[in-house]
Structure formats: C-alpha cells, structure tokens
Amino acid sequence: MKIAPFRIEQYFALHEFTAPHLLSSSDAECVSIADILALEPDAADQLFSQQLGYTQSAGAPDLRAAASAIYRTTTAHDIVVVSAAEEGIFAAYHALLQPGDHVVVETPCYESALQVARSTGANVTEWRRSADANWAHDLAALERAFRPNTRLIYINTPHNPTGLMMPREVLDRVIKLCAARNAWLFCDEVYRELEHDPATLLPAAVDLYERAISLGSMSKTYGLPGLRLGWLASHDHDALTKIINFKHYTTICSSAPSELLSALALRHRHVFADRNRAIVLANLALIDAFLVRHANRLSWVRPTAGTIGFMRVAGVKDTSAFCEQLIADAGVLLLPGTVYDEPTHFRIGYGRTSMPKSLRHFEAWLEKNS
Ligand SMILES: Cc1ncc(COP(=O)(O)O)c(C=O)c1O
C-alpha cells in the first residue's frame, strides 16, 4: 500500500506541542479523567476495578448502546467501535473498496478521507467545493462525478475545514444518487451535535439511508480526543462485518479503560456538547468583532457548527509563509490552507477557552505587520 503524507497531521506534529498559542485546534475544550468520573457515583470504582484484558472487537455492549442513542433508528447492534475516527476511516475504506472501484470524496477535506481512499487502489474523484461559490455544494458536478462502478461517496458534515453544514436538500439528493447505484454513503459526522444553533441539527446519514455509514468520535464535539475512541453506525451489517474483519488487522479491539470512560461520557454527552457550545459561541462573538476590525484583510463564510472555520487572507497567495511567520514572531498556531490545497486560506479554531488570548496575540501581530 502506498499512501501520501498526511499534511495536516505533519503540520500539527511540528508545532502543536511547542507553539504557546493554539489557534487552529479542531477539538473542543478537553476535561480530565476526574471530571468524567464525577459524572456517576460509582464510576471511579468501576475504573479501578476494570480488568485490562482484550475487549470485544465490535466494542463493549454498553458503549455500543450509548453510541446508538445518538441516532434515531439504531440499536447497539448497528454500532462498531473503533480506535477513534481515524481508524474508522482507514478500516471502512479498506474493508469496503478494492482496486478498480470508483469513489467520490467531498473536498477540501480532512486529508485521510482522500488519501486513504486512494491508498486502496480505488479511483478517486474529488467533489470539490469552492471558496468563490461560498463553499456551496455543486450537485450537477456530483452527478457528473458518478460512474457506473461508483461504490462509495464520502461526505463530511459539519465540515472540516469550513465549519459549515450540508443543507438538508443537498443531503437528500446525495442519498438519492447513492441509492440509484446502490453505493455506500460514508458520512463523517465527528462534529455533529455541536451545531451553533441546536435547532439546525441535520439528521445523521445512518437514519436516512440503509447503506449509509455514519462516523462518530469522542474527539471533537465532546472534547475527549485523548480517549482515541470512535464508532461507525450502519444498518448494513454486511459492511460492519467486513469492517470488523479488517479491524482484526489494525487494533483487534479498543482500549478497555477508554471504552469504559467513553461509555460514561456518552451517557452524559449533552453535558459536554452544551459546555463546548457555550465556549464556541462566546469565542465566535470575539471573532466576529475581530473580523470587523480586520475586514480589509480577512474574511470567511461564517461557520454554523463545530469548532473550526476557514479564513481567506486578502492579497496572500500562499498562507504557508504567513502562518510560519506568525508562529516564529508570536507563537500563534494557525493551519495554512496549503494542507487542504486551498493556499489562500488558513484554518482557525475556536473551541478552546484559551482562544481569546491566542486571538489577542494574533491581532497584535497582524497590526504590527499591516
Ligand atoms: C472530519 C474529521 N474526521 C476525522 C477526524 C479524526 O478524528 P479522531 O481524533 O477521532 O481520529 C478528524 C480530526 O481532525 C476530522 O476533522
């Protein structure tokens, strides 16, 4: 298997643990193990007595049940636990695709969605959204992208890096196109339940289409990436079995303490989502005011969900140098859009309580360099 370097993760590996001011993180504010254990009276005892044996490949039954409660139509049997969404992407693509298959991937995207698809030997067509169209979904382009051998389409809503949600009518049309070809719809929903207005929650793909696979994670909305735990939800049990068979070659099963803590956190997931939404909304108000002050240089399509957004820098053709200079001068980490093949943009994160301070450092640097 050949796979291209994962530019987003490479960039973070270089800077995430040294830059003092993180301003592009996609995970919401995290909490400690003690905070999670405080959610239920006997939780600490359960953790201390947890046997450190292998766990079930499909995931612990109570964890699968807690994850299935996120959706309208699923039970624990429709859930397979993975070691975070990243394993879900890897295992789903490799289990379901073979060389010669055709895949459509919505881009720009979290890069593994594109590169792992390519690494299977499948032919990949990008369904590319454009900043010039305000990131609107071009359904005519999607129809043109489909081929008779299209096996799977990957979409991501809420979206990394724009923080926008797919409109319901677009999702319905995507499902119709998949259904006409009996194709799988692989829907990355790791930012779901962090809609800035909870009333705008889009139905999960698994609740709308028999061959949909919804991807969820503890990492983003709930702010618990250190658990390294995610899940795939689908009514297509043949697909889930293929994924479990593939997982036997990656991790076999997930970490027992992570499963216990994840099940506990998911039973109280609204505590995390509500807390993180409050952080996001307070931070967004600061960014709104900041953008008014810097309207001559910076702009975005205001995100509607999640913890990240994508800003365009006027007059800058490649934001790599801009971001490198910002880290060197002010210690502020933004993610250059070059890692998404969108060099006029950078990704900003607003899911952390440290965001106001990081934004102040960014603004001081901008003012010095205007
Ligand atoms: C859209 C998307 N999918 C998947 C992932 C991977 O998440 P996890 O930490 O659960 O592996 C990320 C992480 O940034 C993401 O943004």
Image (cartoon, helix red, strand yellow):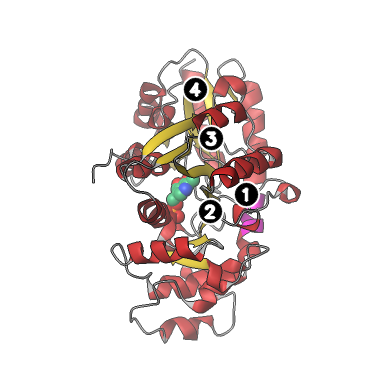
Q: Picture quarter containing residue 254?
A: bottom left
The secondary element bearing badge 1 is classed as: helix
For the residue marked with disc 3, what is the amino acid? Leu
Q: Is residue 304 visible?
A: no
Front position among marks 3 and 2? 2
Q: Picture quarter containing residue 75?
A: bottom right
Question: Are the residues at dot 1 and dot 2 in contact (C-beta closer than 8 Å)?
Answer: yes
In three-dimensional space, the C-alpha distance between marks 4 and 1, rounded to whole angstroms, equals 24 Å
Q: Which residue is mark 4?
A: 366
In percent of width and height, residue 177 lies at: 59, 40
Q: Which residue is mark 3?
A: 359
Mark 4 or mark 2: whose residue is earlier in sequence: 2
Question: Are the residues at dot 1 and dot 3 in contact (C-beta closer than 8 Å)?
Answer: no
Predominant secondary structure, magenta span: helix
Looking at the rendering, the stretch of residues picked out in magenta corresponds to: 273-278
Q: Which residue is mark 1?
A: 279
In percent of width and height, residue 115 lies at: 35, 40
Q: Nearer the viewer, residue 197 or 18?
A: 197
Q: Is residue 349 visible?
A: yes
In three-dimensional space, the C-alpha distance between marks 1 and 2, rounded to whole angstroms, equals 8 Å
For the residue marked with disc 4, what is the amino acid? Leu
In three-dimensional space, the C-alpha distance between marks 1 and 3, rounded to whole angstroms, equals 14 Å
Mark 3 or mark 2: whose residue is earlier in sequence: 2
Front position among marks 1 and 3? 1
Q: Nearer the viewer, residue 329 or 259?
A: 259
Mark 4 or mark 1: whose residue is earlier in sequence: 1
Residue at 52% across, 15% down: 314
